[in-house]
Image (cartoon, helix red, strand yellow):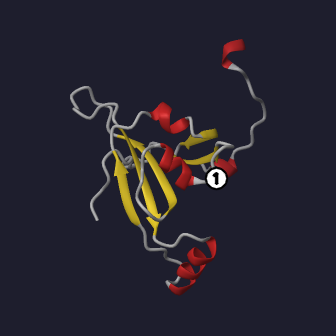
Amino acid sequence: MEERPGRASVQYGDARGEVAADVADQLVGLTDVARNLGFNESGRVVGMSISQGEMSPEDPDVGKVYVTFQVADKVSQRDLQQELEQNGGVLPVKEYMMSDVDIVEVLRWFKRFSIGLFTSAVKPDSLEVVEQIDVEDS
């Protein structure tokens, strides 16, 4: 399978991270987020990726945001669990990509959204914050 456009790689190990998001209260899950972004394929959205291409001024895709949905044919939670058990923990999905999506439109369907990036030398759980300083106040 070919590499998705905009998907970040860490060839030089600059930073790796983690993300967490709470879907907005009026929505139930990722399938609702996808529908509100204009995605109308059948199935259940079980994964969502948001990526941006290389930020080079010469790149014609500079600033373009891609949203990719991983969609399972199974709709119920029970069906998903059965499929995982039957396939040794692997869930077959179809992947659909929307290109040139407005990032503000994506983020508005989340109540909270957090992205953490860390140098390759540390893992987030190995850090102990001993003081928090508001840069605006210092």
Compare residues 76 and 10 and report the one nearer the observer.
76
> Can you see residue 58?
yes
Q: How many marks?
A: 1
Residue 88: image location, x then y, percent: 52, 84
Furthest toward the bottom, the residue is: 86
- Above-or-below relation of 127 to 81: above
Disc 1 target residue: 28
Furthest toward the right, the residue is: 130
Left or right side of 107 for 21? right
- Residue visible at 50% across and 44% down in the picture: 36
- Residue visible at 72% across and 13% down in the picture: 137
Left or right side of 9 for 2? left
Callout 1: helix, strand or loop? loop
Residue type (three-letter) at the residue carrying disc 1:
Val
Left or right side of 99 for 81? right
Residue 82: image location, x then y, percent: 58, 82
Residue 120: image location, x then y, percent: 51, 48
- Residue visible at 44% across and 60% down in the picture: 70
Q: Residues within 10 Å of mark 1 (few under 14, many from 20)?
A: few
Furthest toward the top, the residue is: 137
Residue 57: image location, x then y, percent: 26, 26
- Above-or-below relation of 10 to 129: below
